[in-house]
Image (cartoon, grey):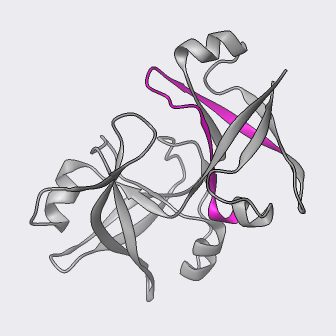
Amino acid sequence: MEYKVKARVSNRHVHLTKEVYDYLFDEEITVRNNINQIGEFASNETLTIRVGDKKIENVRVLGPFRPYNQIEISRLDARTLGVNPPVRRSGDLSDSLNVTLETSKGRVTVNGLIIANRHVHINTKDASKYGVADGDMVKVKIDGDKSGLIDVMVKVSDNGFYELHLDTDDANAFLLNDGDEVTLII
């Protein structure tokens, strides 16, 4: 079966625990804009990620707070930082790398640097309708000047908003823009 789905391009960002956030910022976290995944948002707050003497500034903090720290970057970002983080599903921080987070208030080194895998968000009801389960692998067909077929993990949650998440490297490789429509093949 084939289903149309919108692609969302995910730039580098961090998910923080309340404790690490409070260590790095004096002010409460503030919402810049809500994102489609229900209850989640991009904050106004940014920080610098650093590995040794290499850094990337103005990395957005996403909310709400999580029970773990997770720093998501692209392969190009990894090259900039001179590291080779694993590709992981969100929340799977096994073998993830240490990274230093900095703001004008302070600096802290945490574990959790990964490249997030490609995934399609589906709510529980639609997952049942499509016959897929959390963690299943499906295909996505991308049409256009640089077309292709990619493997994508299904991410099922009660509040999942149906959309495909790709990082900037994947989007650039297929000349995709945020909001472009692709085809999910189940």
Q: Position of residue 88 (x, y in %)?
A: 59, 47
Quadrant of residue 169 within the rendered picture:
bottom right
Residue 132 locus on image (x, y percent): 69, 18
Residue 76 location, x and y as percent? 64, 74
Residue at x 58% of width, y 31% of height: 162
Q: Return the residue found at the far bottom.
A: 53
Q: Quadrant of residue 151?
A: top right
Q: Is residue 105 magenta?
A: no
Query: Which residue sits at x=63%, y=17%?
Result: 127
Please say whether residue 157 is one of the residues in the magenta stretch: yes
Residue span colored magenta: 150-169
Residue 89 lies, with reference to residue 144, above or below; the image says above
Q: Residue at x 71, y 15 (%)?
A: 130
Residue 104 vertical placement versus 121 (above, below): below
Left or right, residue 96 beside residue 126:
left
Front in this rendered view, residue 183 or 76: 183
The residue located at (31%, 72%) in the rendering is 47
